[in-house]
Amino acid sequence: MTRTPSDGAAATAETVAAIVAAAAAAGPHCGRTTVIAIDGPAGSGKTSLAAALAPVLDARTIHMDDLYEGWSGLAAAGDRLTEEVLAPIWLGRPGRYRRYDWHSEAFAESHEVPIADHLVVEGVGCVRASSRRFLSVIVWVEADDDVRLARGLARDGVAAEPHWRSWMNAERDLFARVGTRDLADVHVDAWGRLRP
């Protein structure tokens, strides 16, 4: 799995404006940083939405794909996000994490996350019980399973299908436990459009 957009769909201007407005209304919850979390199932369009949103806010983007320890790393990545990035920023210190390299199956270089006005975090499971208090806005991006799987296999190759199917089950369980969809402030469809 890589963090490149799997669909090429860009968020609409209306969607970006709605998220920016929600962030302004909420204000910072992580020290002086307003954190926008873009969660939802793999292949739904989160990376594309983050790519459209971050420049408008002059924000750094954290990709959860860099925090997962491969296909089996979904469960632990939430704690890594909180402990290595969000909690330090809340305390007034830069965050720091080591990127996981999916190809070499090992941790790679370290990345510092400086304190800034805005931070965008995108990826499956970025909203957890441990991270919620630091988040100003939660965005839920959703797509049908067949669309997501097609996008994922187009990006990662057909050999990744067993991994994708296992991942889809794991994320479904995680979302049910966290209640992510119901926690969201903004709902977006697979094509970057606002949903009611």
Image (cartoon, rainbow, N blue to C red):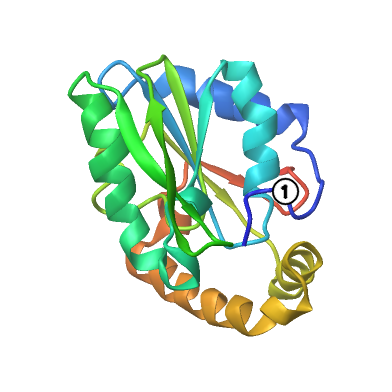
Q: Is residue 195 visible?
A: no
Give the crowd class for mark 1: few <14, some 14-19, many >=20 residues within 10 Å: many
Q: Measuring 27% from the left and 44% from the top, which residue is drawn there?
A: 82
In the image, residue 90 above or below residue 81: above
In the image, residue 141 above or below residue 35: below
Pick out the residue farthest to the bottom: 162
Q: Measuring 68% from the left and 77% from the top, which residue is drawn there?
A: 160
Pick out the residue farthest to the left: 91
User: As rendered, which of 120 and 4 lies closer to the eye?
Assistant: 4
Q: Quadrant of residue 34?
A: top left
Q: Measuring 25% from the left and 39% from the top, which residue is drawn there?
A: 133
Q: Which percent across, then down, holds residue 170?
A: 46, 76
Q: Which residue type does callout 1 highlight?
A: Pro
Q: Quadrant of residue 30?
A: top left
- 191 relative position to 91: left or right: right
Q: Quadrant of the N terminus?
A: bottom right
Q: Which percent across, then down, holds residue 172?
A: 48, 73
User: As rendered, which of 41 and 21 lies closer to the eye?
Assistant: 41
In the image, residue 38 above or below residue 106: above
User: As rendered, which of 47 and 19 lies closer to the eye?
Assistant: 47
Q: Is residue 49 visible?
A: yes
Q: Which residue is mark 1?
A: 5
Q: Secondary structure at mark 1?
A: loop
Q: Which percent across, then down, holds residue 174?
A: 39, 69
Q: How many marks?
A: 1
- 6 relative position to 132: left or right: right
Q: Which percent across, then down, holds residue 126?
A: 42, 50
- 134 relative position to 56: left or right: left
